[in-house]
């Protein structure tokens, strides 16, 4: 749980589910170059519903360690896209989205690229990390 504001009346807090939903929203906005997947690299099918499908929560892990928020994201990239550019864009989007609700930058954001989608899925296991210590 991340504390946003504290005053004489108490504290306003945001739970991990809300943080996950914010991050999933950023992933879905990048759907032209990113496909969310689970930890094993299985793509999560795009479902055009107005609500975020519960399967998408398998692609994001948000946890707190030593009072620092850490984020892990599992994705598949589309062929022809630069992995470093995608990772940089996703890092910036996550940090900006969390800053909008006045949560400090996560201590560590890890993007696990589980494959590259061309005509077929080519399995990869690439990990890109941004540390904000």
Image (cartoon, rainbow, N blue to C red):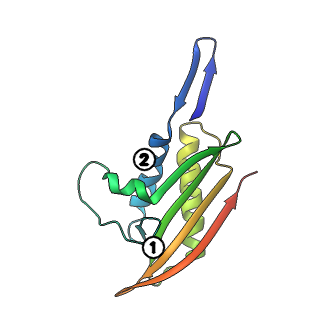
Check the picture and name the quadrant holding the N terminus.
Answer: top right
Say which residue label 2 marks: 21
Where residue 81 sits in the image (x, y, percent)? 49, 79
Distance between the Cα atoms at labels 2 and 1? 19 Å
Where 112 falls versus 99 (above or below)?
below
Q: Which mark is residue 76?
A: 1
Q: Which of 105/125 is in front?
A: 125
Where residue 132 sits in the image (x, y, percent)? 72, 53
Report the side of 7 relative to 37 (left or right). Answer: right
- At x 51%, y 53%, the residue is 61
Q: Secondary structure at mark 2?
A: helix
Report the side of 129 relative to 79 (left or right). Answer: right
Q: Secondary structure at mark 1?
A: strand
Q: Which of 78/114 is in front?
A: 114
- At x 59%, y 42%, the residue is 99
Visible residue check, residue 127:
yes
Displayed quadrant of residue 83: bottom right
């Amino acid at each position: 749980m991340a504390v946003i504001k504290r005053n004489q009346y108490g504290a306003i807090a945001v739970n991990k589910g809300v943080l996950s939903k914010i991050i999933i929203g950023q992933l879905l906005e990048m759907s032209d170059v990113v496909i969310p997947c689970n930890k094993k690299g299985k793509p999560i099918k795009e479902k055009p519903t107005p609500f975020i499908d519960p399967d998408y929560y398998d692609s994001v892990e948000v946890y707190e360690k030593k009072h620092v928020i850490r984020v892990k994201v599992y994705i598949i990239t589309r062929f022809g896209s630069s992995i470093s550019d995608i990772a940089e864009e996703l890092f910036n989007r996550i940090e900006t989205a969390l800053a909008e609700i006045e949560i400090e930058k996560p201590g560590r954001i890890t993007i696990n690229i589980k494959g590259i989608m061309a005509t077929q899925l080519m399995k990869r296991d690439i990990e890109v990390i941004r540390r904000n210590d």
